[in-house]
């Protein structure tokens, strides 16, 4: 079961618009959180309500945060960069979470360097989103081996291929079609933005993402980046 995911340009416009709005929402949100926190001492007996308000505010905050990753055009800095190094940094960043969830991130890097012209921070964001999803899916499948296999190699037709393979809960055929839609999530605390952002970034790099999945067996995300110098 394999599906190449192509998303239309309308997503770019939606993304940019929403990023602008997200920026405007952040300041009032911060002040709202602050003042509600100040109220806490005066509203004894309403702990349940207080906790719901705080967790809903935090949910808005994480949605806003994910959009703001896109809202920094001035920070975009394309350069010739080592994709293996970006993945290594991603793994270092996610190791504490993986350790806590009892999941091993196992890497297979034949080379030490595999360079392409890219925006390293954006590529890192893609790797973070997809490896994080893999960890979360692994946790949700209690019967699986708790290892995520991450490999990077060059294909014969000149792509850098990054493969992230989990033994998680898997994705059904119907749900596979919806991946990358804004706000599509099956998680209680999910935002449904991680993959939308990832598809957008990889498309901007002239690459593509393929997903293969089997229910209760696991999912494999393959990210293809063109090998180019400028
Ligand atoms: P979120 O993680 O906030 O839900 P994403 O855009 O990252 O949003 O992912 C959207 C949905 O795609 C997830 O809610 C999940 O249902 C599904 N998904 C993504 N990656 C995987 C995976 N590796 N295994 C199983 N399901 C996945
Ligand atoms: Mg996610």
Image (cartoon, grey):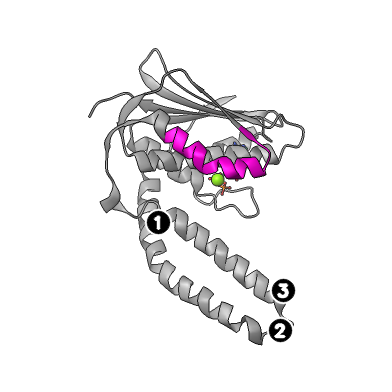
Q: Which quadrant, please, contains the C terminus?
A: top left
Observer-nearest of 162 and 173: 162
Q: Is residue 230 visible?
A: yes
For the residues marked 3 and 2, what is the alpha-carbon distance in whole angstroms? 10 Å
Percent position (x, y) of residue 217?
69, 28
Q: Is residue 182 left or right of residue 14?
A: right
In the rendering, which numbered label is found on residue 44?
2
Q: Which residue is mark 3?
A: 48
Q: For this view, does 208 lie left or right of residue 108?
A: left
Residue positioned 62% across, 66% down in the render: 55
Farthest top residue in view: 156
**Nearest-to-viewer mark from 3 and 2:** 2
Residue closer to the observer: 102 or 62: 102
Earlier sequence position, callout 3 versus callout 1: 3
Q: Quadrant of the N terminus?
A: top right
Q: Position of residue 69 (x, y in %)?
A: 40, 52
Label 1: which secondary element: helix
- Residue segment shown in magenta: 86-104
Above or below, comparing residue 33 to residue 164 in the picture:
below
Which quarter of the figure has residue 117? top left
Secondary element type, mark 2: loop
Quadrant hosting residue 22: bottom left
The numbered mark at residue 68 is 1
Q: Earlier in the sequence, mark 1 or mark 2?
A: 2
Dot 3 falls on a residue whose secondary structure is helix
């Amino acid at each position: 079961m394999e599906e190449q995911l192509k998303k239309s340009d309308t997503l770019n416009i939606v993304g940019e618009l929403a990023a602008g709005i997200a920026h405007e929402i952040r300041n009032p949100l911060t002040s709202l959180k602050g003042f509600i926190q100040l109220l806490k001492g005066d509203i004894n007996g309403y702990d349940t309500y207080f906790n719901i308000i705080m967790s809903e505010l935090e949910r808005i905050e994480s949605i806003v945060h994910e959009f703001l990753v896109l809202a920094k055009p001035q920070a975009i800095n394309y350069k010739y960069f080592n994709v293996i190094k970006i993945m290594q940094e991603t793994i270092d960043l996610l190791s504490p979470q993986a350790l806590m969830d009892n999941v091993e991130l196992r890497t297979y890097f034949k080379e030490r360097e595999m360079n392409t012209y890219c925006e390293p921070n954006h590529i890192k964001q893609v790797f973070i989103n997809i490896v994080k999803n893999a960890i979360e899916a692994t946790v949700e499948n209690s019967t699986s081996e708790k290892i995520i296999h991450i490999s990077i190699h060059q294909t014969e037709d000149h792509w850098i291929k990054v493969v992230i393979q989990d033994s998680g809960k898997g994705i059904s055929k119907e749900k596979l079609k919806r991946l990358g839609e804004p706000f599509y999530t099956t998680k209680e605390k999910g935002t449904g933005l991680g993959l939308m952002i990832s598809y957008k970034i990889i498309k901007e790099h002239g690459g593509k993402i393929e997903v293969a999945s089997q229910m209760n067996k696991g999912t494999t995300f393959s990210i293809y980046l063109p090998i180019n110098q400028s």
